[in-house]
Amino acid sequence: MAQAPVTECFSSIQGEGILVGLRQIFLRLAGCNLDCSYCDTAGVHEVPELCQLEMTPGRRDFVTLTNPVQGEQVISHIRRWAEAWPAIHHSISVTGGEPLLHGKALLEWLPELHEILPVHLETNGTLPEALAPLIDYVDYVAMDFKLPSASGVNPVWEKHEAFLALAARKQAYVKLVVDDSTQNWEIERSCSMIAAVDRNIPLILQPVTRADGTVSLSPLRTLELQEFADAKLREVRVIPQTHKFMGQL
Ligand code: SF4
């Protein structure tokens, strides 16, 4: 089975998006194709020499594996957890960095993981060609639209558009990381793109969240941005990164 660089594998509470609060197994792959100004993943562009692998769900008793990790090692570990603690986890969150950079390995890993638990893919939504062969093995797609203002990333609207068209075949939602620099036109353009696919796709407005849980978006502006989005979409939620103020990984 193919190998891939894995930063860590652990059990925790999902802190973002429509599955917020649910317990998941997190499989974090290394590397990213973007460079967002608010990125909170340390060393996101480096492949760590070692992968941190939690032995007991939620007990932080990590051991290390050498990268790249063999698919069999990760999958047998997650299968063992699902058998020994069958009621704990709602799903497996495949995250990064940008996990779709490792599409070739995921083509072998996801069919196996999908048999163990539902798969929740967390992605920056810029690699539609990598998603296409994997979509059948994914249950939930949490994708970003990168707003140039808050992220500092060059516009990638066409990539997001192609990605969402594929992701919408499953339970998909779009996340916009917003702050006081966010422009009204960015919200309107994002909502138009979502509505063109399906206006029932949930939109999450996620204020940039500092480590102490405070956010970089004023209360009044939060309400204004939600109103712009509500004019075009059925379900617009404002959810900060809750794991930060709970002290969860
Ligand atoms: S896409 Fe995500 S992981 Fe990559 S740089 Fe941006 S915030 Fe960090």
Image (cartoon, helix red, strand yellow):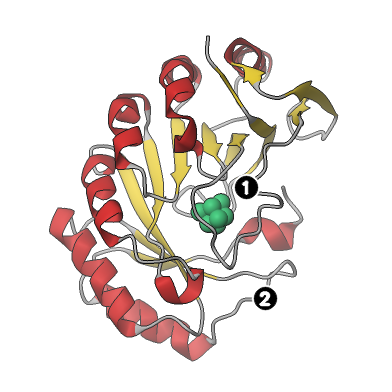
Task: Give the labeled residue for mark 1.
Answer: 45
Q: Secondary structure at mark 2?
A: loop
Which residue is rendered at x = 53% and y = 9% of the image?
1
Which residue is rendered at x = 53% and y = 14% of the image?
2
Q: CA distance from mark 2 to mark 1?
A: 26 Å
**Residue 154 appears in the picture as rendered:** yes
Q: Which mark is residue 214?
A: 2
Quarter of the displayed picture in which ligand 1 can be seen: bottom right
Q: Which mark is residue 31?
A: none
The picture places residue 109, in percent across and down from the top left corner, at 49, 18
Residue 128 lies, with reference to residue 109, above or below; the image says: below
Residue 191 lies, with reference to residue 125, above or below; the image says: below
For disc 1, the neighbor class at 10 Å (few under 14, some 14 to 19, many from 20) is some
Q: Amino acid at mark 1?
A: His
The picture places residue 38, in percent across and down from the top left corner, at 59, 66
Q: Amino acid at mark 2?
A: Thr
Going by the image, does 215 lie left or right of 231?
right
Comes first in the chain, label 2 or label 1: 1
**Residue 16 appears in the picture as rendered:** no
Going by the image, does 69 lie left or right of 222?
right
